[in-house]
Structures are given as C-alpha cells and as structure tokens.
Image (cartoon, rainbow, N blue to C red):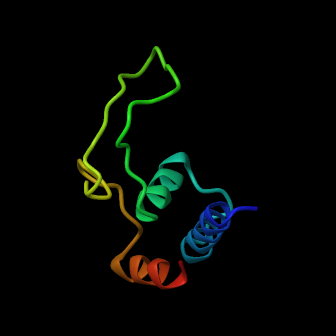
Amino acid sequence: MTGEQFLFLMAIDAFKRVNNKTFPSWSDVLEIIRRLGYRKVQPSEIRVSQAEDWTEAADAPIWPAAAPSLDSDADLESYEDAA
C-alpha cells in the first residue's frame, strides 16, 4: 500500500467515525478527496459521454459551488482533528 492510499484510507475511516456512518455516500467520498487537497486540474483520461469534462485552478476551494457540509462545525473540527 502506498502512502497516498494509506492517507486516503485513514481519512475515510476518520470521516466514518466522526459522522457515525458505516458507508459514506459518493458525495462524502468526493468531499474527503477534496479535503485531502485533490483538485481537478487536468482533462479527464476517461471519456464519459453523459457528463461534460472540466478543470479548475489548483487553489480552488473545497466546494466551488454551494457546498454540502458535515452535520455541524463541531463535526468538522472533530473530522479535521481525526484526519
């Protein structure tokens, strides 16, 4: 397992513990990935006919539009501390 994979696994585990979720939704997984610092800065290598490809700046916010969020600020702080 690479360091990148281990960090992702630990972030998912922390999110599940803090939010008391056994199975995070795909939106949750995307939030975790973005909180780890990942941004879409290159065109996709996978062609998806049902969706338009896009890119963003490397310093884009976690959620470019109206953001889904954790249940409360306390959860957010706990999640960040746990990660």
In the rendered image, the vertical position of residue 21 relative to residue 50, given as above or below: below
The residue closer to the viewer here, 51 or 58, is: 58
The residue closer to the viewer here, 1 or 16, is: 1
Report the side of 9 relative to 57 (left or right): right
Residue 4: x and y in percent read 61, 62
Residue 35: x and y in percent read 42, 64
The residue closer to the viewer here, 46 or 48, is: 46
Q: Quadrant of residue 18?
A: bottom right
Q: Quadrant of residue 51?
A: top left
Residue 6: x and y in percent read 67, 67
Residue at image x 25%, y 54%?
60
Report the side of 13 relative to 58 (left or right): right
Residue at image x 50%, y 27%?
45
In the rendered image, the vertical position of residue 15 relative to residue 42, given as above or below: below
Q: Quadrant of residue 53?
A: top left
Count of marks overlaid on the render: 0
In the rendered image, the vertical position of residue 76 relative to residue 34, given as above or below: below
Residue at image x 53%, y 54%?
29
Residue at the limit of the structure toward the top, as seen here: 49
Report the side of 1 relative to 21 (left or right): right
Residue 77: x and y in percent read 40, 83
Residue at image x 56%, y 69%?
15
Q: The N terminus appears in which quarter of the rendering? A: bottom right
In the rendered image, the vertical position of residue 35 relative to residue 74, given as above or below: above
